[in-house]
Amino acid sequence: MTTLLRFQGQDPDDLFEPLGSNAPDPQDAGVLIHGQDARARYAPVALGAPIAFETRRVSKGRDWRDWFAAKGSVSLALAGVDGRWVGVGDAALTNQPTVTATVSFQIRSYGDWLFTGGNSHGAITISPPASGVWLPAGGVAGDYEVQFDVVHTGEGDVANGAPVWQDCSSSHGASLTLPTLSAANAYEREGELSVRTRIRLKTTQQVVSDSTCVLSAVTIGYA
């Protein structure tokens, strides 16, 4: 729904970032748009960057440029991903032949993100939420790019499907794997992979999402 306001011929809906799930500016702007104060419609400028020009619309002594963030300038963490630790393990039973563990995180072309894991017994159920949405409402995956910055500690093999910016019209992931090993080893292996996931608009190269999670894998053999 557009507004009746125009700043240099542009609708403020095309200039300012929607509020979404962000906390609004603590002060009312004193301007109603479709029955709600503008602060309940647009993200505060503190969450992003101002637009390039003054609007000359002043609310309570502040130009709207100083109230609200420019559209596309707000970088949001992905809920369910940022700050998350996801672990997968394989503790051998007596006479179990092998141990292995793998855990991965994906940004998929369908517009969702996904954690998966497995060990020598097959797929492992990841504690909820195992998936969620990264693509903004109404967006097209091909308009975005993703990059993973990974830091590995301990043991295991690392795969990074997006060490540089990659088109989100294809799915990309990062994973940590403790390769298959005889279970009769009396040996514990452990590794962790920190995965920073950034997503940006291709047209402006503006980062719209920045989240970090940790993938962990452990295997324990028997004597």
Image: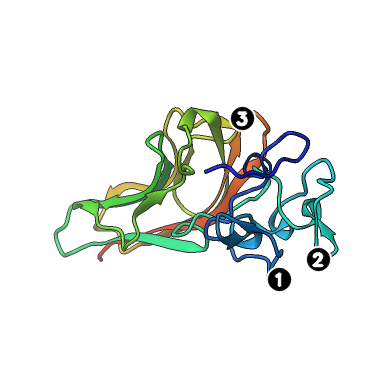
| Contact between labelled residues 1 and 2, with CB atoms less than 8 Å apart | yes
Q: Is residue 177 left or right of residue 124?
A: right
Choose top left, top right, bottom left or bottom right for residue 218: bottom left
Question: What kind of element bears circle 1?
Answer: loop
Q: Earlier in the sequence, mark 2 or mark 1?
A: 1
Residue 33 percent across, percent down from the top left: 60, 55
Residue topped by disc 1: 27
User: Residue sitting at 81 percent across and 40 percent down?
Assistant: 52
Determine if residue 177 is in view.
no
Q: Earlier in the sequence, mark 3 or mark 2?
A: 2
Residue topped by disc 2: 60
- Depth check, front residue: 154 or 21: 21
| Contact between labelled residues 3 and 1, with CB atoms less than 8 Å apart | no
Neighbor class of circle 1 (other Cα within 10 Å; few <14, some 14-19, many 20+) is: few
User: Residue sitting at 63 percent across and 65 percent down?
Assistant: 24
Q: Which mark is residue 94?
A: none
Residue 59 percent across, percent down from the top left: 78, 61
- Depth check, front residue: 176 or 126: 126
